[in-house]
Image: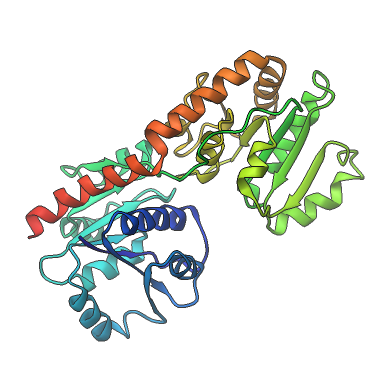
Amino acid sequence: MTIVHLEDEPWDSGIAAYALALAAEQARRGHSVAVWGRLGSPVLAEAAAAGLAVRGWKNPWIEMPRLRREMAALAPAVLNAHTGSAHALALALAPRGAAVVRTRADARAPKGGALARLVAGRTAAFIAANSSLKAQLEAAFPGRSARLVMQGIAGPAAPAPLPREPVVGMIARFDPVKGHEVAIDAVRRVRAAVPAARLVCAGAGALRERLGWQLKPMGLSDFVSFPGRVADKWAFLASCRIGLVPSLSSEAVSRAALEWMAAGRPVVASRVGGLPDIVEHEVTGILVAPGDARALERAIALLLRDAALCEAYAEAARDRWSRLFSLAPFYEDTQRAYEQAARPAR
């Protein structure tokens, strides 16, 4: 099958990660796959680095005649649009007989006006990256169903044993929505019960510098560290006993939660976005209300003090990732949606 993914964001994002992981796995399985997007974007750079065919544009509407000729020459069975603007482009570019599929992996609710309904009527299938988005799509477009396809990722062949040290980790860009300040407050409180507890936050972003200035004056530098981007992601995850995803909102897809589970680590996460679909409460981790430092503190303390429970959650997290969130179910669920969408189009 020839597949073209349209992802036109100018930055890296969870939406981009979803699209690129899928495209790379489809290519590995023998499909002819291309990624189209903005010239100079991280999306196209990462796609090219993965060996995928790429096509960039500066202004697609001005370049439309050329883009349509190139798309017709590819003769794709499916055009998969990953953003709203890419959805409109896909409908404009789709050759006769091609199916347009819209994947929603962003936190914003779909619009349900007359124009949106017209666009939906020309769309062969909708894919939702979490159950909340699925419900929103089906409410916005009565009579249309959306297929739930959660993101899958590759993981290590086997998880490393849990470290003895009570290290709690985050891997996320430093942005207020990710909840770093809540995590710091929670671990500060945890130290009353577990004095050796430490918080290590990997990642980059403007907030990292501001928070870094505050560590020493606030007496936090003894147990909080910001190593920046880590060269070996899996080694970092293996060095932590618990993974945190304390986001305040968003998380339509959560690559970090999936990575913690693939690494065989229990996850303490906020009950936002797609996280309740990923983390099975009190089985693979613990879900708390967003922004609730005290609830986060209690969850972390429980897992640090109860070694058997922490081990059980870790094992269950790895098993749940393998069954539901590895690349195989991600690919297979998507292909079923594609085949259903392409059948009437042909």
Q: In the image shown, does 122 or 112 lie closer to the viewer?
A: 122
Tell me which corner region of the image, top left, top right, bottom left or bottom right, holds residue 53: bottom left
Tell me which corner region of the image, top left, top right, bottom left or bottom right, holds residue 119: bottom left
Q: Residue at x 31, y 55 (%)?
A: 26
Residue 275 makes an appearance in the image:
yes
Left or right: residue 15 compared with residue 125: right
Q: Is residue 318 above or below residue 301?
A: below
In percent of width and height, residue 80 lies at: 28, 60
Q: In the image shown, does 313 or 28 lie closer to the viewer?
A: 28
Q: Residue at x 78, y 56 (%)?
A: 209
Q: In the image shown, does 163 or 330 lie closer to the viewer?
A: 163
Q: In the image shown, does 175 or 312 lie closer to the viewer?
A: 312
In percent of width and height, residue 111 lies at: 32, 53
Left or right: residue 74 compared with residue 25: left
Residue 186 makes an appearance in the image:
no
Q: Quadrant of the N terminus?
A: bottom left
Q: Quadrant of the C terminus?
A: bottom left
Tell me which corner region of the image, top left, top right, bottom left or bottom right, holds residue 294: top right
Color theme of the render? rainbow
- Direction front: furthest residue: 157
In percent of width and height, residue 97 lies at: 10, 66
Q: Residue at x 32, y 53 (%)?
A: 103
In percent of width and height, residue 341 lies at: 16, 52
